Amino acid sequence: MNLADHPDKGTSFDVAVIGAGVVGAALARAFTLAGARVVVLEKAVDVLDGASKGNSAILHTGFDAPEASVELACIREGYALYHDIRDRLGLPLVRAGAMVLAWTEEEEAGLPALIAQATANGVLDVQPLTGPEAQTLEPALSRAVRAGFQVPGEHLIDPWSAAHGYLLQALANGAVLKRQTEVLAGRRSGDRWHLATTTGDVSANLVINAAGLWGDEVDRRVTGESWFTIRPRKGQFVVYDKTAAALAGHILLPVPTKITKGIVVCRTAFGNLLVGPTAEEQDDREHAPVERPTLQALMRRGEEILPALAGHEVTAVYAGLRPATEEKEYRIRTDLAPGYICVGGIRSTGLSAALGIAEHVVRLAERSHTPIADPVWPRMTNISVDGARDWQCPGHGGIVCHCELVTRREIEAALTGPLATGSLAGLKRRTRVTMGRCQGFYCTAELARMTEGRLAQPMAEPPHD
Amino acid sequence: MTEPEVIVIGSGPAGLGAATALAQAGRRVLVLERETQAGGIPRHCGHYPFGMREFQRLLRGPDYAARLTDAARAAGVTIRTRTTVTSLQPGGVVEITDDAGPSALTAKVVLMATGVRETSRAARLIGGEKPGGVLSTGALQGMVYLNRQRPFRQPVILGSELVAFSALLTCRHAGIRPLAMIEPASRITTRTSARWLAAAMRVPILLHSDIAAIHGRTRVDGVTLATPAGQRDLPADGVIVSGGFRPDAALLVGSHLQIDAASGGPVIDRWGRLSDPAYFACGNLLRGVETAGWCWSEGRRVAQAILAALQDHLPEPGGVRLSLAHPALRLAVPQVVGAGASGSPYDRLQVRLSRPAKGQLRLMQDGRILAATRIDSRPERRLSLLLPHKLGHGPLTLTIDEKT
Ligand SMILES: Cc1cc2nc3c(=O)[nH]c(=O)nc-3n(C[C@H](O)[C@H](O)[C@H](O)COP(=O)(O)OP(=O)(O)OC[C@H]3O[C@@H](n4cnc5c(N)ncnc54)[C@H](O)[C@@H]3O)c2cc1C
Ligand SMILES: Cc1cc2nc3c(=O)[nH]c(=O)nc-3n(C[C@H](O)[C@H](O)[C@H](O)COP(=O)(O)OP(=O)(O)OC[C@H]3O[C@@H](n4cnc5c(N)ncnc54)[C@H](O)[C@@H]3O)c2cc1C
């Protein structure tokens, strides 16, 4: 039901990107700007329906990434590029800075090594902190904090507008998006791939697998085998009311372990306070349920770090799935089949690294298109706390979502245009409608009216008597 | 309209009750309402009984809301819909936004009457996935009565406050057949007379039970219940998360005005005045839920206090902050009690419990009982205590001498 994704936009392309997560979005942008004719194939009703649906939304510096890894290089490059292009695309940046905090003797003992690693990774502005110094910077912090260090470059972004912005720029410069289009199989003949999809065949010289949680499966479907296995790792979160955001200016990070970056407490780009994620292995790639005992444990952890958090209202809870694999490193490979690049296992840093991954893959692809000389730069409407909002401008048509101050004009815009959404979840990601305190108590009916006949899965059956 | 003397935020029964009374007394009143229609919650309560107190007639919610609105306009009240108040500034300066963009309005007195909402699924930490079709009663009513839509066919209803039975009525109206009502407590919250409705609709009430998980990726395709007999799956296609009323105090958050942590609403004195005396409040914003009729008459009484304020006839702000000194006490309004005069709109403490309790409810100061009443009550039941006119200066506490 994505009327925007018109079928007669062709079936023959230079590059086919499988998957419209944040990585696929950045790839589509980079290859389009490099001069290729790109198609993005996404099986879901809307983009960002996989791993990119729920994350912590931290723009990482790479201070704790594995040394000399592709991941580190991509995070560094992605981080720099995000800063370069964000103004032109209208993408937010909340300059929070992070503090890595040690709560036990053992953790404290690990700090020097982490600081050394940050330096080795090229993050040169880290600053050691004593417990009292940390408390001076963050007065709401528990007295139990022993020591830590500051990473001034870690920032907060909007988890979705970045990917939307990349895709929108790709589309504005000639790329084609096909949603509800699942890649079923691939066949190479001559120098072209022929992909069988649920909406017909698509051909391209170069196929890029950016299928996130389904990366191994898409490898198998296209090339016949996969060289890794996805092991989904769930992360649950609790999002507190905006009243709690004043309790932490910095992103409060724990000392990371081998498996996870651990439980973070930070603001969100929308002015809430978030605690999470957990790291729970599971087999299911589609369903990411939250569990009350786990959420309660997260809340307890949050209150240990910020005692004043107790009593603040919970606004939202959610869970995301990381496309983890047997190994930590990204699974990027060009030699599985000719004209095929696998960009798999972008586990827990893909939001930060996406732009860097895209440049890296463009270089790997070694193609000789002529870059677009004067690309179009569409601008995203700001829905974060970093800048003016639509309700502050005339002609917005009135407020629909009262908690997040989402306007009628914003909702209309999300339902139209080249990246028009056909799902309620997509509408939420683009506008934040129903994502505030009341979680849809006030605006659900109005929204059901506005979206009538415009969503693949309607909010309600049509009028009764 | 020339500059209003009074701005009322919210056009529910409380706001319109007050606005009408003020206009009838010759004051220039502007009501600001963010929805497209005035009338507040009753706009989407398509059932009876509304209006007995106000119009001596039995009305459905939407007709009642229309009548309240007509009465206010007839009295000379200006109502501006599609106008959202975005922040409150000291001295009665109200920032708004509407289609023309942001602007500010000023009045001598601003009355807040922004009502209550239900507690969300997220705030209750209900497990499972996050499909569409998990709705509050308010959202369900809006879809059914305002849009004539049907969001699901066989949901479960969580909660057993009175509003859960409104949800049942709403379902019946739309041809929706709930599979069960689920209540974590050992008995239903509202007065048991509401039980007949569930029985008549053949909807079982499962006590001591809770929703352990909601299933489905885009639409609800089942729920798992935790019951005394263990976990149990129901093929529900929706969930109505009802009740758990909480004041819509969003405007107070981040403003200069004091919030009461216990009620979640503003701190008021017995005149309905907030910590900045340019602001007053009434209606369900104060305490969670009361009926529309109650809120309407509360609005009319607060209007009298506002009229006195406009003539500088109110006593100076001041008084002692009440503290709750018993675990079964959930909230008490007003929170600031000064020496009284007759005619104050909040001459009674309105009290709610957090658990059932039996005994004597007591207002204490300097070791003396200022007022007391026998109670044998439960959460969500109305409780009140007449405030004395004479007060000392020591700390004021409310407590229960409990009989176990
Ligand atoms: C809990 C959590 C916290 C995180 N925190 C951060 C953070 O703070 N900072 C950060 O930088 N990163 C973070 N991440 C990581 C980041 O979210 C991921 O790295 C990133 O989203 C991966 O994106 P992707 O595009 O590779 O995969 P996905 O988003 O999964 O995209 C793949 C897409 O491919 C589609 N697809 C699959 N199979 C097919 C097919 N056969 N045909 C067509 N389409 C198909 C899917 O529908 C999906 O849309 C976090 C992740 C999680 C889960
Ligand atoms: C789902 C539900 C069902 C109910 N059913 C019944 C019932 O059947 N019978 C009954 O007697 N009571 C019922 N109630 C109780 C209800 O709260 C009262 O009937 C009554 O509506 C309370 O009146 P009020 O004026 O305090 O608030 P409301 O009626 O809630 O009115 C508040 C108004 O303020 C507006 N507002 C809020 N913030 C702003 C802002 N920032 N800017 C502009 N406008 C704003 C809102 O849009 C709303 O119109 C129900 C409540 C709920 C939530």
Image: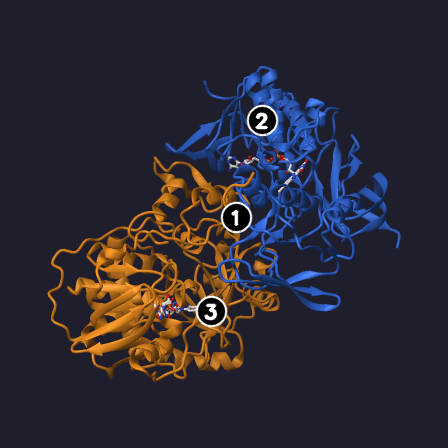
Chain colours: A orange, B blue
- Picture coordinates of residue B2, whole percent (x, y): 45, 18
Above or below B188: residue A81: below
User: Which quarter of the figure has residue A92?
Assistant: bottom left
Q: Amino acid at mark 1?
A: Gly
Q: Residues within 10 Å of mark 2 (few under 14, many from 20)?
A: some
User: In the image, what residue occupies the spot 77% across and 52% down?
Assistant: B355
Q: CB of mark 2 within 8 Å of CB of mark 1? A: no
Q: Amino acid at mark 3?
A: Glu
Pointer 2: what residue? B66
| Local SS, label 2 | helix
Question: In the image, are marks 3 and 1 on the same chain?
Answer: yes
Pointer 3: what residue? A286
User: In the image, what residue occupies the spot 34% across and 56% down?
Assistant: A161
Mark 3 or mark 1, earlier in chain: 3
In which quadrant is the N terminus of chain A drawn? bottom left
User: Which quarter of the figure has residue B395?
Assistant: top right
- Picture coordinates of residue A52, whole percent (x, y): 39, 65
Locate ligand 2 by image quadrant: top right
On screen, residue B312 versus residue A454, left or right, reads right
